[in-house]
Every structure is written in structure tokens, then in C-alpha cells.
Image (spheres, rainbow, N blue to C red):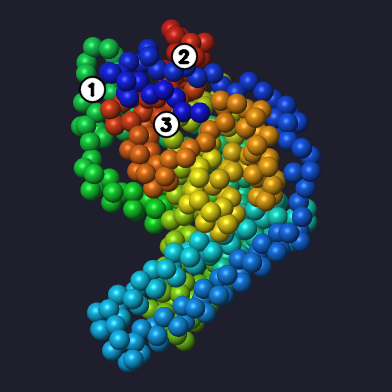
Amino acid sequence: MPFDVPEKREGYSEDALPEFTPLPWKLQDIRDAIPPHLFVRDTRRGLAWLGVDLLMAACCWRLALLIDPTFTDGATVQRLSVPGAEIARWLSWAIYWWFQGLVFTGIWVIGHECGHGAFSASQRICNTIGFATHSLLLTPYFSWKISHHRHHCNHASMERDEVYVPKTRSDLGIPEEDGVRKIDYDEYLGDTPLYTLFMLVRQQLLAFPAYLVFNVSGQKNYPRWTNHFDPNSILFTKDQRDAVLLSNLGLLIMAAFLQYACQAWGSAAVVKFYGVPWLCVTHWFIMITYLHHTDPELPHYRQAEWNYQRGAAATVDRNFLGWMGRFFLHDVAHYHVIHHFFPKMPFYHGAEATQHLRAFLGDHYHYSEKPVFKALWDNYNACQFVEDTGSILFYRDKKGHAVARPAAQYRVTGGTTSSQ
């Protein structure tokens, strides 16, 4: 439920911010509010959805094979003119990239379901399909599954979460507010809109590979060079070493196939048929997860106030691309809150389960109808840093303003640890 933001009224005052009290229930209380049949995994139903995705990918590929021959044909060029045929050709490729990118992302989501064990009650089936689908899309299945599991177990924890850990005031070198000196936040955060757009595009295209290779946006306490490919990385235990190596092998096999494809059909064809849709997967995945976990209204917690269910509630469901998001992306953005509470619940039960969850949580359930590209821009600007002190934290924007503060008993007073 949106907070009544003081900035939208006249002036801004910390004392006027709406107060937030963290979720009070035990996880079992929340689970009891969800009908048991919604936790049942149906392997055949999951396989049917995977089959639909693969069929759509094949149909998109088959139609794309017609693009260049159709629009370079002499009769077509004569009818449309040379510029007209070229515009139509690249417009057709753009349509292919849009839909194939969504289909590829849906296949990636199936692999994500497998990683959680939500695809089937059989772990062998989950790992076989997850390994195949994620390797096809250049994602190290077992390595990412391990770190992603820890993200779910520690979501919204400043000390233990694996990804989208907010920067703090001191990380950005911004002095503490002391009530006397006025801080010029533009000096620290005042980027031009053009530069902000460049950084946002960079995030959308490179953030996932950068996270896998360099731990960008990951836990800051990890050593330098932490990554998802080194079996001796701090991300993994000794028992997980072979799984990491198997993930690497899957990527090497896919890389070898792509090299063969480039030699057989040309690099340009591989880029058009596979490369651009793969970049779309990276974009959609980062956009979805960023908007799930990054919002001015979502709290982050330090150890004193964090627990699993509070972290799970610190996510937001979004109307992501309307029917296309629901169909192609398997509701991964529409019903993400329930997924954080119960990651083994299959995606096709998300809609019904969310109705029960929303009724139980009340104002602790977060949902946004804001158009997602506007939300991406707004949140990228509004979510700059959190405070160095306190147990319950809210993002502050480029003016140092927040949209909420913890209730009085959770705020910093004297030597106690809460937030402001």
C-alpha cells in the first residue's frame, strides 16, 4: 500500500514521514492462510508449459528465417522501394527480438522454477531440466541456484543477502546529517539525466553477467574476485564444488556450439537469431528482479530486526507488461511476493495463492500498478542509499529524502539500534 509521501505535500520533514511497523507474524501463521493444494507440484503441467515455450521459440525462429529472404527479394524491394524494404526488414527483426526475448525469458523462468524445486517433486527432473534450460541461456545453473537460494533465505538482510544490497551513506562518502550543516546532495548524487540513462542501460544489459563474474551488487563483505565460476569461491562449500564444475561444463558446451554456429552460419546470423534475444533475457531478468527488490517503500533490515518472513514481505508485485508478462514470463513479476514466502510453490498457483496472502498480510503486502519502465526510471533515481545506523532502513533519494520511517520503538534513540 503506497505511503503518503511528504515531498508530495508542501515541504519535507522527517517527523512527518509515515511510520512503519514490521510484519509481526510467524511464517507458519502465513502458511496456514494458504490452502494446501496450492503447494502441490504437477510435473506434467510443468512439462506442458516447457513444451509450449520450446514450441513458441521454434515458431519464432522459423518465421525469422523468412525475414531477410522476403525483404531482399526483388519483387518486395520494387513494391516497397529500397528504403521501405530495409525499414520493414529491421522492423520485422525488432518484432522477432521482442517476442523471442520474452519466450527465452520464459524458458529461463522454467529453469529458475527448477532451481527452487517448484517444477517437480523429483529433484532429478528439476536439476536435469534446469541445467539444460539455463545452460542454453548461458546461465551457470547449479552455481546460480546455490547463491539464489541464499538470497531467498536472507532477503532484505543488510549483512547476509546475496544481491541488490543497498549502498550506505558512508559507501558513497556522504556525511551524516547533524541538523546544523546543510548537505549538498547534488555534489554526491547530482548526475545529469543523460548520464543516468546511460548507467541505467548499462545496468540492464550488463548487470547479470557482472554479478556472475564480479559479484557486482552482491554482498560487500565478500572477498575481491568473488564469482560464480570458481569452485573455491566463498559462495560455495566444498560439497558443492562438483556442481559448480558441472555448471561450468554446461556453459563450455554451449559456448562450443555457438562457436560452431558462427562458423557454419556466420556470426551475424548467430547474433540476430540468438545473441539479441539473449540480451533481452538479461534485460528482462534484471528489470524484473531490480523492481521486485528495489523500491522506496520496501524496508531493509539489519540483524536485530530481520527474519525470513519480514524479508519475504519486502518485495513488490507488479503489473509487468500486462498479458504478455503473465503468459510469456509465467507470472514471475506479477506474483513474486508469494514466491519469496514459498519458493517451492509452482508459478501456476501464484495468482490464487496471492489472493489469500494479500488478504492475510493487509498493508504489509506491496503491489504497484505503475508502468514498469516509468518505475524503473523512478526507482533508479529514488533508491540511492540507506543509513549507516539503524535496524530498519528505507532508501533515500538524491535529496536525502525517504518516504517512510520505522515506528518510534524501532528508531535510533541514544545508544539503541533501530533506524531513522
Using the image, determine if residue 211 lies above or below residue 295: below
The image quarter containing residue 305 is top right
Q: Disc 3 versus disc 2: distance between alpha carbons?
A: 18 Å
* Percent x, y of residue 361: 62, 27
* Percent x, y of residue 227: 49, 52
**Of pointers 1 and 2, the one earlier in the residue sequence:** 1
**Of pointers 3 and 2, the one earlier in the residue sequence:** 3
Residue at the top extreme, as displayed: 414
The image quarter containing residue 186 is top left
**Residue at (50% x, 51% y) in the render:** 322
* Residue 411 tag number: 2
Toward the viewer: 132 or 269?
A: 269
Badge 2: residue crowd in 10 Å (few <14, some 14–19, many ≥20): some
Q: Disc 3 versus disc 1: distance between alpha carbons?
A: 21 Å
Q: Which residue is mark 1?
A: 183
Q: Residue type at mark 3?
A: Pro
